[in-house]
Amino acid sequence: MTETKTPTVTKEQVLGALKEVYDPEIPVNVVDLGLIYGVEVEDGDVHVEMTLTAAGCGMGPYIAQQAEWRIAELEGVDDVQVDVVFEPQWTPDRISDDGKKLLGID
């Protein structure tokens, strides 16, 4: 009898979940704001590197926790690690076209 491995989560699924996480001060999700620097998925373990619009943002821990909780809800996720980094520094150039439309800066 062969062991069947349950499918793990994909990077696309993680990014989809992160599109449901918002900076409470800005009505645009963290993906379209350009705050997600990297997503790695390996055998159900998810590692995300993200930043904030400003290094002193008091909402940083809240946003990172929301990201972690949302990813953890995905089927196939065993462990989640969200690291907030500040290199490279975030700039408005990272905002997606959809994000710019939502902010009225397209």
Image: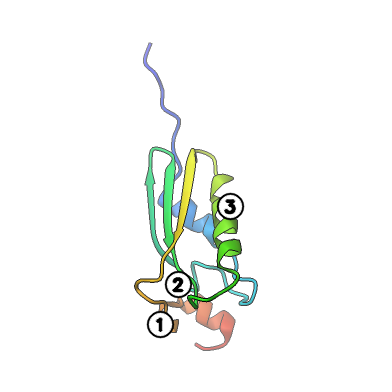
- Cα–Cα gap, marks 3 and 2: 18 Å
How far from the left and from the top, in percent, is residue 14? 48, 53
- What amino acid is at disc 3? Arg
Q: Which of these two is toward me, 29 or 91? A: 91
Tell me the quadrant of the picture where the N terminus can be found. Answer: top left
Q: Which type of secondary structure does the marked residue at label 1 adopt?
A: helix
Q: Which of these two is toward me, 54 or 26? A: 54
- What amino acid is at disc 1? Asp
Q: Which residue is mark 2?
A: 34
Q: Which residue is mark 3?
A: 70
Residue 51 vs 53, above or below: the answer is above
Q: Residues within 10 Å of mark 2 (few under 14, many from 20)?
A: many
How far from the left and from the top, in percent, is residue 23? 59, 70
- What amino acid is at disc 2? Gly
Q: Which residue is mark 1?
A: 93
Q: Is residue 83 left or right of residue 21?
A: left
- Cα–Cα gap, marks 2 and 1: 8 Å
How far from the left and from the top, in percent, is residue 58? 59, 72
Q: Earlier in the sequence, mark 2 or mark 1?
A: 2
How far from the left and from the top, in percent, is residue 77? 49, 41
In the image, what residue occupies the spot 44% across and 54% down?
12
The mark tally for this picture is: 3
Q: What residue occupies the far top of the structure in this picture?
A: 1
Looking at the rendering, which quadrant does residue 4 occupy?
A: top left
Residue 82 vs 56, above or below: the answer is above
In the image, what residue occupies the spot 53% across and 59% down?
18
Q: Earlier in the sequence, mark 3 or mark 1?
A: 3
Q: Is residue 29 left or right of residue 94?
A: right
Q: Which type of secondary structure does the marked residue at label 2 adopt?
A: loop
Label 3 close to label 1 by CB (< 8 Å): no
